[in-house]
Image (cartoon, rainbow, N blue to C red):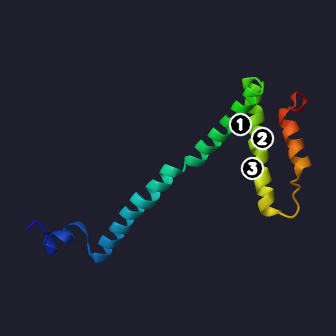
């Protein structure tokens, strides 16, 4: 009837434990390792897209391509550092209008590079 008999089961696996181990290894590979491999490049793509967007805004503000790319990387780096500080030292970070104006001025003023 298409159902393997007890003998063919042991042809592929030494015992029930070997079958369970093989099933778990296949499940881990298909549903864990492959998924991790598939999504591992997402942060790189997101970072690249964010930096490209910031660079496009800077280019539309009049910066040359190379300068816009440098400032975009600086802006994104500052953003990540700011997030890290907010997480690790929330009571010690300055985050007011004057700070935000200073950051914008540093990124948008020609002399700040």
The answer to whether the residue labelled 2 contacts the one labelled 1, judged by CB atoms less than 8 Å apart, is yes
Measure the C-alpha gap from mark 3 to mark 1: 14 Å
Q: Is residue 73 left or right of residue 47?
A: right
Which residue is under mark 2? 75
User: Which sits earlier in the primary sequence, circle 2 or circle 3?
Assistant: 2
How far across and down, in percent of the image, does residue 102 sit? 90, 42
Residue on which disc 1 sits: 54
Q: Nearer the viewer, mark 3 or mark 1?
A: 1
Of the pair 11 and 97, the residue shown nearer to us: 97
In the rendered image, the vertical position of residue 18 relative to residue 78, given as above or below: below
Give the residue at x 66% y 35%.
52
Badges 2 and 3: C-beta atoms under 8 Å apart? no
Task: Give residue 80's mark.
Answer: 3
**Horizontal relation, residue 69 to residue 34: left or right:** right
Where 42 falls versus 107 (above or below)? below
Q: Residue at x 75, y 31 (%)?
A: 58
Residue 19 % position (x, y):
29, 71
The kind of secondary structure element at disc 1 is helix
* Vertical arrangement, residue 111 with respect to residue 95, above or below: above
Left or right: where does residue 97 sit relative to residue 14?
right
Could you say whether the residue bearing mark 3 is in a helix, strand or loop?
helix
């Amino acid at each position: 009837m298409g159902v393997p008999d007890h003998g063919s089961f042991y042809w592929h696996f030494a015992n029930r434990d070997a079958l369970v181990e093989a099933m778990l290894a296949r499940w881990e590979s298909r549903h864990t390792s492959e998924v991790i491999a598939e999504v591992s490049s997402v942060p790189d793509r997101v970072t690249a897209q964010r930096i490209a967007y910031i660079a496009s805004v800077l280019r539309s503000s009049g910066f040359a391509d190379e300068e816009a790319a440098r400032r975009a990387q600086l802006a994104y780096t500052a953003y990540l550092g700011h997030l890290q500080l907010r997480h690790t030292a929330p009571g010690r970070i300055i985050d007011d209008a004057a700070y935000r104006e200073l950051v914008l001025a540093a990124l948008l003023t020609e002399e700040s590079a």
